[in-house]
Amino acid sequence: VLLHEELAGDEVLVVSNREPYLHARTRKGIEVQRPASGLVTAVEPVMRACSGTWIAHGSGSADKETVDRNDRVAVPPSNPSYTLRRVWLTKEEEKGYYYGFANEGLWPLCHIAHVRPVFRSSDWEQYEAVNQHFADAVVKEARTDDPVVLVQDYHFALLPRMVKEQLPKATIITFWHIPWPNPESFGICPWREEILEGLLGSTILGFHTQLHCKNFLETVDRYLETRIEHEASTISYGGKLTQVKHYPISIAWPEPNSEQPSVAECRKTIREEHGLPANHLLAVGVDRLDYTKGIIERFQAIERMLELHPDLVGKFTMIQIAAPTRSSLDEYQNFETRVRTLVQRINNRFASGNYQPLILKAEHHDSEQVTRYYRASETCLVTSLHDGMNLVAKEFIAARDDDRGVLVLSQFTGAARELHEALMVNPYHIEQSADALYRALTMPEAEQSERMRSMRSLVKDFNIYRWAGRMLLDAARLRQRERIMSKIR
Ligand code: G6P
């Protein structure tokens, strides 16, 4: 409701690399899949609520078979409410733009996860070309000359400016879903000026936290000649004004659902499926198999906890759901090997009979499956080394309508700025994480419920519609001001 009011009939276009639905050819025929992406989790409900067009890279094996002549398909497939416009990329474009510049360059650059960014001129050229390609698709899809364009993430740093050049009246809201590092770190990028100029084509540029906004303003200050109003958090560059603001992203609060299995059922069936006794203690982790997520440090903390509390050996298991991701990149392959080797070593060390303390499920799980694990576990471990927001933390809270369960949360996530009642850890400090895990497993129910209730009321209030609503409201105000100014002129 709120979104419709903010939009007042404006046309909305979303641009992101990852598509919300992909069609894959399987033995059973064409199947619809949902990718594991925080961005998709967050933006999808917004699009359902306000229709419009979502432009994204068509990456499913049967995507081409399901679109119309204009590469469009109505989604969600079960209940169409907006348009997905697929953009096709060649293997070379995908390699340079997505795997190369975005995921070997910008991803490690912005996460400061001690993985060296790789910058190649050939990747940069593809990144520019693909940004232009998507910018042209926005212009082609737009039916009005002043649409609201929602640009998502580090794949499209150049696109805001490119769209602005062709549609000067468009309101461009760009959201950067990953952290923004300090000027020294960002300065490593050989194309730092171009990236900054591209982003400054945005009317509004959003980050998850104030710290990321501050880092961005300082980076611009360091590398471009601009006028920055620090109080108002605006940057004027080339006669254009960009508002830089933090909008912490969130999730759609789940509707009460009578078909959802109860917490008691989830606890029982998940334990049965893994051959564990009814009172077995469980921790869950849900991540893409990505080196920024602190999965290795998490397993080391578990090992340490079992060393310190041998009484828990045989009584505690961690189930790690790890969706494979970007697996054609060396760093990701190496990471997977390191994770698997560590799991084996720790399991060998503590195994007895059928018991193993770590269960690694390195495959995709849909959201209903993941919710069952959230509901079945005593604690959820989110130990990212660095993370823009981390929506797993919020999903876990949303899943616990029994007000039980403990969230262990890395202080280096955006979520830590909001979820103060989580047990906060520095994931690099293995002893501290081991203590936090033990505390989570032994926390009295009254304390669990006090903490959980307070986090639940926060996430329920500051849900994804608030996130989008606040950005759209700010955009509506700027649009109105622009209209008045142009009348005066
Ligand atoms: C993060 C990024 C998203 C991305 C997601 C999944 O959440 O911010 O832009 O979609 O990871 O990664 P992938 O490369 O599979 O799209």
Image (cartoon, rainbow, N blue to C red):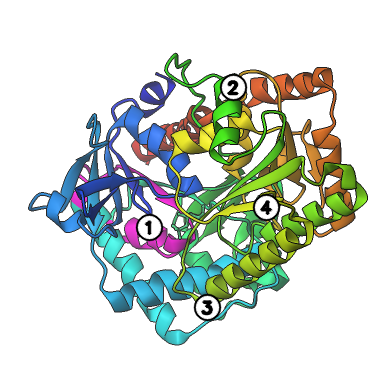
Q: Nearer the viewer, residue 399 or 417?
A: 399
Disc nearer the start of the sequence (4/3): 3
Residue 263 circle label: 2
Disc nearer the start of the sequence (1/3): 1
Mark whose residue sits in front, 2 or 4:
4
Cβ of mark 4 under 8 Å from ligand 1: the answer is no
Tell me if residue 244 can be seen.
Answer: yes
Q: Residue at x 65, y 57 (%)?
A: 217
Disc nearer the start of the sequence (2/4): 2
Callout 3: SS: helix
Q: Was residue 163 drawn as part of the magenta stretch in this picture?
A: yes
Q: Residue at x 33, y 53 (%)?
A: 168
Q: How far across and how far down the image is residue 60, in percent?
A: 27, 57
Mark whose residue sits in front, 2 or 1:
2
Residue 358 circle label: 4
Disc nearer the start of the sequence (2/3): 2
Q: Which residue is mark 1?
A: 17
Q: Amino acid at mark 4?
A: Leu
Query: In the rendered image, which quarter contains the C terminus?
Result: top left
Query: In the rendered image, which quarter contains the N terminus?
Result: top left
Marks 4/3: CA–CA distance: 25 Å
